[in-house]
Each structure stands twice: as structure tokens, then as C-alpha cells.
């Protein structure tokens, strides 16, 4: 049979690179570690390469001159690949030019939580041996950033401790609480484990740790119940895991960088909502921390203070960002009882509310209102002076005062904008005023 000459001259087809994936573990055969390191590079974000030794790394597209991000998942109930990890890797590679290594320890993390906890030290030692191979290739300790989810955050802490706190950064995404809240700093993530340690807390009343564990600790919406998560047990698995996993989704959203997730240092969530923490002067000298790939979270001071609790409010879905505004009401005359005023910002059919309480025998009250719309797009403010609940008689009490607002951080009084006219409020009657704030 005659073959055309062009067929003979064709080069053999290039073999397609084989992509590796996470393992699946049977719930009953967890406990063995069987750790895999999967490398993902910017040129091929969807294809993981199994890397074990230095030769694997050199032949796999690993670039020792770039930063390296190590993702460590946590406890796995079902022994399957984490549902969020593919999107996390892709988003990370889009956000930064780096080597991304996913640590697959599905086998050691499956089954019973307490047996996964027992594997933390063994896993940490294996990761240290692997990172030493990177150092041999010329990678600097300070260019390594560990991102640990739940139990993975404490694995990251132990790895960082074994490197004497010299790794560049550790990000803990809702670090695990059970078995760790009362643990010593040697056993859990803490600020001494890397040059910069941050933690995002979203489930402190259940699976997440309640205490600060980094230089900067974000307590999102107070750190407990996240907006949009089910509040009833009948929602099943989603009820159990939604708050805990919100830290992961917040971080992914921050990497997509559509708007800043900025937070404010404060002694407590209650104090933050009451408007007592308006700037980041203490202790960050006005540099407010932000979630995402910002160097040191945007905090520009040395040495870094430790275990600083910072607070922010978010929406219920991506991109999650809220703007935070101070709202203030100054009474013209003192009253003999507490004055409660509900304040609502309106912007093209969307409303955002907060409450100001002015203690009795005081003239001034304030609070924080969070709004997804930029401040300059808010065109109206509504007030409702709460009645004293005298059932048998209509409350005809009226108050007069001045209303002011300012976008956080409020570093100087020039940012404060007040309504030009005094506000007259009658109990239980809603009053509306136009709000005109220029766009910056």
C-alpha cells in the first residue's frame, strides 16, 4: 500500500502531560497518611503534577525564583477531595505568579476527627522534609506561604514552628477549635510560627477556635454566625459546615479582589458595633488590615503586635464586602431614659439598618452601619425613634437632634458629614431625610 510521504515525515504526537488528582479514602481505612504533594503552576492551573523528590520538582515546571503557596486541607468527613480546592488553586494562580502545592492527606484526615488530630505531628514532619527539598533548590524560607484550612491551620503552625518561625507567612482559615482551644502554643497555630501569621475566624462557637492565634485575627461578623448560613439544625450538613467553610470562600473572594475586605481592631465585637473603634491607630498606626494577598495584611509596622482582634461585617454571598460607616446622633436636650433610634440608609431600593442607643442623661450616641453600596450612592436616611412601649397610651414624645455620619476608617473629623437641619423625631414615627455625599 502506497503511503504519502507527508505521513512518514510527521513527528509523533506529543504525549499529553498526565495530571494527578487527590486520592479517595474509604472511611474505614483512614489513619494511614499516604501524603501526596500536587504542584500547580501558572501556565497549567488545572493540571496537578505529583512531586515527591527534587528531580520531580525540577522536571515539573516548579520555579524556584517564584513564591510558593502550600494549601493544607483539614479533617475530611467522607474521605473525598475537598469541594473547594480546585477553585481555590485556580483563583490563587490567577491572583499571583507563584508555585501552588496542594497537600493531599485525605487518608490521614478521614474517619474520626481525633485520629486525624493524632496524625498532625506525623504530617507536619513529612511536610518539613518536603520543604527542605525546596530549600535545596534555592527557595528562600521567607517566600513560603502556608494556607491551612481548619485542622490544616494547626499543621501549618507546627511546620512553621519546626522552621523556627522563619517561613514567610501562615494564613489560618477558621483554625480548628476542638482539641486546640486549650492547647499550648507548641501544639497549635500561634504568632511565633512565621514572620506573619493571620487567621480568619468564622465559626468560633462550633468547629473554629475562639482565641486569637496570629498577629492579626479577623473575627468576621463577630466570628460566629455568618449571614446566609442556615440557622436550623434540619438543614443538615450545611448547617454544621456553612459557618466553618465561610473563611475559605471569603479568602477566595478576596483573591478575586473585586473589593477590599477591611477590618478594624477593637476589644470586642460589641464595642465595634457600638462605634468605639473607628480607625486603626491603635495598634496599627492607621494601617487597617485587609484579607487577601496584601503584604502583612496591609499592616505597615515593625515589630508586629500579636493576637490583635479585628472585626468586619460582610454580606451573605460573594464578594461579601461591606463599607462601614459611623452613625452619630446628638440630642439637643438630656433625657431621663435611654434613647433608641433605628437608622436606615437607602440606596435604589436597598436598605441597611443599625441602631443607636443614647444612654440616659447623655447627649451623644453612636453605632456602626454596614452597607454594600458605596456611601456616595446612598441617597436617603430614615430614622425611627423607638417608643417606650406604653401600651395603654400613645407615646407622643418627641426629640430633636443632629445626625452625622462618616465612612470608616475615620482618621480625622473632616470626614464627618452632618445633615444641615436638626432632625425632629416623634416616637414610633419614621422620618426621612435626603443624604448627599460626594463621590471621591
Image (tube, rainbow, N blue to C red):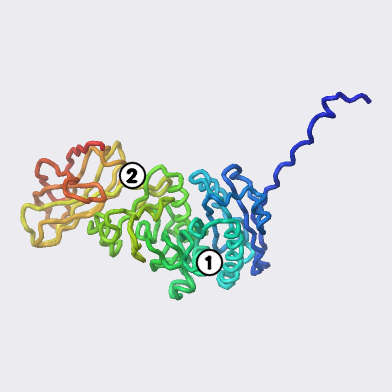
Give x and y (percent) for residue 388.
Answer: 15, 58
The residue tagged with tag 1: helix, strand or loop? Answer: helix
From the top left corner, tell me how far across and down residue 190 is, in percent.
43, 68
In this view of the protein, which residue sits in the foreground, 431 or 152? 152
Tell me the quarter of the picture where residue 139 sits: bottom right
The nearer-to-camera label among 2 and 1 is: 1
Going from N to C along the chain, the mark reached first, 2 or 1, is 1
What residue is at 85 percent from the left and 24 percent from the top?
Answer: 5
Q: Is residue 58 left or right of residue 139?
A: right
Q: Nearer the viewer, residue 186 or 314?
A: 186
| 185 shown above or below 402 | below
Q: Is residue 361 left or right of residue 269?
A: left
Position of 104 compared to 436: left or right?
right
Establish if 159 lies above or below 230.
below
Pointer 1 residue? 159
Q: Which residue is mark 2?
A: 372
Marks 2/1: CA–CA distance = 38 Å
Residue 298 horizontal/vertical position (percent): 36, 52
Q: Position of residue 46 (x, y in %)?
A: 61, 45
Choose between 423 and 107: the one closer to the eye.
107
Could you tell me which quadrant the N terminus lies in? top right
Amino acid at each position: 500500500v502506497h503511503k504519502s510521504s507527508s505521513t512518514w515525515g510527521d513527528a509523533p504526537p506529543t504525549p499529553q502531560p498526565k495530571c494527578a488528582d487527590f486520592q479517595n479514602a474509604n472511611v474505614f481505612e483512614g489513619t494511614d497518611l499516604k501524603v501526596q504533594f500536587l504542584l500547580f503552576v501558572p501556565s497549567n492551573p488545572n493540571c496537578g503534577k505529583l512531586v515527591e523528590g527534587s528531580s520531580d520538582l525540577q522536571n515539573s515546571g516548579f520555579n524556584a525564583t517564584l513564591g510558593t503557596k502550600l494549601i493544607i486541607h483539614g479533617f475530611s468527613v467522607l474521605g473525598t477531595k475537598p469541594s473547594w480546592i480546585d477553585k481555590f488553586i485556580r483563583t490563587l494562580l490567577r491572583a499571583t505568579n507563584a508555585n501552588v502545592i496542594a497537600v493531599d492527606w485525605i487518608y490521614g484526615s478521614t474517619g474520626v476527627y481525633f485520629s486525624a488530630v493524632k496524625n498532625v505531628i506525623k504530617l507536619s514532619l513529612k511536610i518539613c522534609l518536603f520543604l527542605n527539598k525546596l530549600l535545596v533548590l534555592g527557595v528562600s524560607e521567607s517566600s513560603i506561604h502556608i494556607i491551612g484550612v481548619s485542622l490544616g491551620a494547626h499543621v501549618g503552625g507546627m511546620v512553621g514552628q519546626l522552621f523556627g518561625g522563619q517561613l514567610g507567612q501562615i494564613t489560618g482559615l477558621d483554625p480548628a477549635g476542638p482539641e486546640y482551644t486549650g492547647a499550648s502554643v507548641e501544639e497549635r497555630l500561634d504568632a511565633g510560627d512565621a514572620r506573619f501569621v493571620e487567621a480568619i475566624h468564622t465559626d468560633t462557637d462550633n468547629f473554629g477556635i475562639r482565641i486569637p492565634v496570629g498577629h492579626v485575627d479577623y473575627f468576621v461578623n463577630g466570628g460566629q454566625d455568618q449571614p446566609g448560613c442556615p440557622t436550623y439544625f434540619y438543614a443538615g450538613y450545611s448547617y454544621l459546615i456553612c459557618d466553618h467553610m465561610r473563611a475559605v470562600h471569603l479568602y477566595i473572594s478576596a483573591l478575586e479582589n473585586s473589593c477590599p475586605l477591611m477590618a478594624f481592631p477593637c476589644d470586642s465585637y460589641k464595642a465595634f458595633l457600638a462605634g468605639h473603634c473607628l480607625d486603626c491607630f491603635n495598634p496599627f498606626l492607621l494601617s487597617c488590615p485587609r484579607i487577601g494577598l496584601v503584604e502583612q495584611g496591609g499592616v505597615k509596622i515593625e515589630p508586629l503586635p500579636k493576637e490583635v482582634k479585628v472585626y468586619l461585617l460582610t454580606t451573605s454571598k460573594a464578594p461579601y464586602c461591606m463599607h462601614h460607616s459611623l452613625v452619630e446622633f446628638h440630642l439637643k436636650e438630656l433625657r431621663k431614659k435611654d434613647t433608641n433610634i433605628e437608622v436606615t440608609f437607602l440606596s435604589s431600593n436597598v436598605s441597611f439598618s443599625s441602631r443607636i442607643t443614647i444612654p440616659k442623661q447623655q447627649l451623644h450616641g453612636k453605632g456602626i452601619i454596614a452597607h454594600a453600596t458605596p456611601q456616595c450612592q446612598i441617597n436617603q436616611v430614615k430614622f425611627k425613634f423607638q417608643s417606650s412601649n406604653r401600651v395603654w397610651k400613645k407615646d407622643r414624645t418627641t426629640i430633636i437632634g443632629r445626625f452625622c455620619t462618616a465612612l470608616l476608617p475615620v482618621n480625622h473629623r473632616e470626614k464627618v458629614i452632618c445633615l444641615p437641619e436638626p432632625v425632629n423625631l416623634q416616637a414610633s414615627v419614621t422620618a426621612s431625610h435626603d443624604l448627599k455625599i460626594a463621590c471621591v
